[in-house]
Image (cartoon, rainbow, N blue to C red):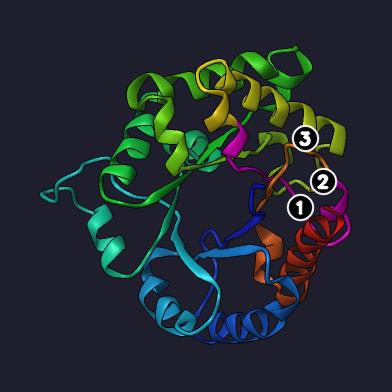
Amino acid sequence: MRRYLVAGNWKMNGSRQANSALLEKTAAGLARCRDVEVVVCPPAVYLDSVGQALDGTPIRLGAQNLCDRDTPGAFTGEIHGAMLKELDCEYVIVGHSERRALYGETDDVVAQKFQTAQTLDLVPILCVGETLEQRESGQTEAVLKRQLEVVLEQSGVVSLSRAVLAYEPVWAIGTGRTATPQQAQEAHAFLRSQIALRDARIAAALRILYGGSVNSGNAQALFGGPDVDGGLIGGASLKADEFLAICVAAQAQVTKS
């Protein structure tokens, strides 16, 4: 059985004081979610202090981005994966739609970052998803297949045995709009089927998260899909009560099974 994963992407938010209060309350409430893996991904400048605050808690540390180069050097402003490992990061988000849309990261760049993350012993959370225009024109599956194929061609299907996939429809990120449980399940099932064409065992074991305006009110329904293994949570991860409620929703799915 795949273990549910709930990852909080704090994006460019936080302060030392706010982070401390958020983590303290979140960690205290996770006793209700013992079967769910929980990760937080703060801004890079807070990775060290957040990592220290997580010591002794069940919460794991992730980063929001990394450089595509596998060796350090003259790349001003970039963060090498080994630096993330030194701060006890286990996960790193790659290919988030905001990186693709706002900073011009192509499928090839995302595939390279994915490979670099694994080379440096980080678990990539690979994000894929379509825009509203692409969905409305019936291109959802074609877009997901293209984004996934570039990674598979470069790193091979076996790489997904050390990775997490996240389906995040661009039209549902930070907009208040959310894919219906059926839409989420259909996209997740399609992604898993594409991987199964190469390796059914890896496809069955791969965790696929849903991301896109997940909150305490819709998490339980979204996580009910058989191919939905948790969530990549944005704004709701900045509110301890909301984030905990989402984790509880994931735990409820474990209890059902």
Q: In the image, what residue occupies the spot 36% across and 24% down?
A: 108
Q: Earlier in the sequence, mark 3 or mark 1?
A: 3
Give the magenta range: 204-221
Whether label 1 touches label 2, CB < 8 Å: yes
Q: Earlier in the sequence, mark 3 or mark 2?
A: 3
Residue corresponding to mark 3: 184
From the top left corner, tell me how far across and down residue 117 is, in percent. Answer: 33, 45
Q: Secondary structure at mark 3?
A: helix
Regarding residue 58, the answer to whether it shows in the image is yes
Residue corresponding to mark 2: 222
Within 10 angstroms of label 3, few (less than 14), some, or many (20 or more) residues?
many
Residue corresponding to mark 1: 214
Q: In the image, what residue occupies the spot 86% across and 32% down?
A: 182
Q: Earlier in the sequence, mark 1 or mark 2?
A: 1
Q: Secondary structure at mark 2?
A: helix
From the top left corner, tell me how far across and down residue 180 is, in percent. Answer: 86, 37
Q: Which of the 4 quarters of the picture holds residue 247?
A: bottom right
